[in-house]
Amino acid sequence: MTPSDLIKQLFLSFNSKDDEAFLCAAREYIEREKRKKHNIVARELEKALYDANVSKNSVAERRFKSSMPIPRDTEKGFPLLEIKHFDDNWENLILTQSTKKQLEQVVKEFKDADILVTYNLNYKKKVLLCGKPGTGKTFSAQVISSILHIPLIYIRFDAIISSYLGETATNLRKVFDYIENGTWIVLFDEFNIIGKNRDDSHEHGEIKRVVNNFLQMLDNFNGSSIILAATNHQYMLDPAIWRRFDDVIYYELPDAKTREKLFERYLRPMKRDNDIDIINAAKKTEKFSPSDIKMIAEEAMKLAIIDSRNSLSMPDLMAAIDKFIKREKVKQNTVEDE
Ligand SMILES: Nc1ncnc2c1ncn2[C@@H]1O[C@H](COP(=O)(O)OP(=O)(O)OP(=O)(O)O)[C@@H](O)[C@H]1O
Ligand SMILES: [Mg+2]
């Protein structure tokens, strides 16, 4: 292999996130430097490759973390968490300015944690994301993980809990032990369980115990990660829960301007007729979530495609919107029989 082949191999393995191939090519490169008696260069490269302190995101550290066994449920053996890698950016996350600002601050504080510490201040370690379904809570965790180049640990809170209430404390302990051993963006998703069972007094007692358990572990958490918890039951936010989080970010339904941006974003893949009226589309979709608008845009594009057109027409868009308005009515049981 020529030196340029080796560099190409490095780039390719980086691109496909193949750590094994990357390390193999990197080691080969270092060996060659040693053979050429470039000892100082070889030592520098070795340090950059293996020393976990060089960078929080170094390949060496990521390998260390993923080489630990993923905790599993004792009874059924299912994994209690998933490690995921994402590649997204801020531009794809369309939020009202104040929500976005809050999120950006979480990221900035994490990046500047070293400076904050010199003032005896901590970055926001525990953040609660709440708001209506489909407004981008789960998506935000993915974007933060992408921007910081830190893998996302995804934990479905309700899955840990619902199956064996008795096992829950053990499961939670295992999860916290795991996350305290590395640097991650941790998402406890579908935290909704807390709100869901409010009316059921028996269940409520159990759930309350579990939640207290979780909050205690959260209180004692001292890792170097960011912990996010997401729920669409914001009414469950009593002060005891609020207090535990360093910040609470509320995801509103998008206003008209934000809905326009969402249509622009999700209609981007297709050419459009000149008379497409995004402002009108935004007007007609009040109270729709970003996720609904994404589905409308996809539906509209499909209507054009299956009609063998390569340009989106206004009737396509209006038909998709009408379909969703009807769907909402079915959901709310207010549809009138024709
Ligand atoms: N603010 C947003 N900007 C751009 N796209 C969005 C936004 N919110 C949602 N989406 C799109 O909708 C999809 C679903 O959203 P997401 O799963 O993040 O919603 P959620 O708030 O977690 O909802 P739930 O409360 O039901 O879990 C996302 O993957 C993304 O494609
Ligand atoms: Mg979600």
Image (spheres, rainbow, N blue to C red):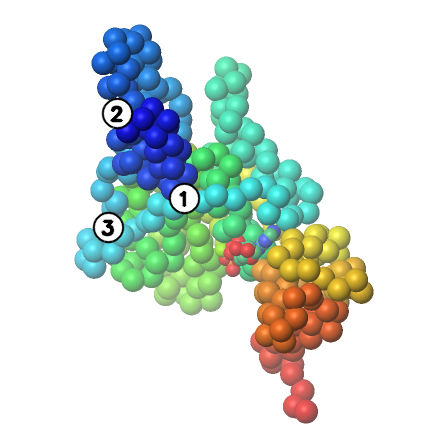
Ligand 1 picture quarter: bottom right
Q: Which mark is residue 85?
A: 1
Mark number displayed over residue 72 = 3
Name which of mark 1 and mark 3 comes first in the sequence: 3
Residue 218, horizontal then vertical, whole percent: 40, 39
Is disc 3 placed on a helix, strand or loop? loop
Mark 1 close to ligand 1, CB under 8 Å: no
Residue occupying the point 49% across, 24% down: 113
Return the residue found at the far left: 75
In front of the other: label 1 or label 3? 1
- Amino acid found under the numbered disc labelled 2: Glu
Q: Which residue is mark 2?
A: 28
Q: Are marks 2 and 3 in contact (CB under 8 Å)?
A: no
Residue 70, x across and y down, in percent: 26, 45
Locate the C terminus by quadrant: bottom right
Work out whether residue 37 can be spotted: yes
Distance Cα–Cα, label 2 vs label 3: 36 Å
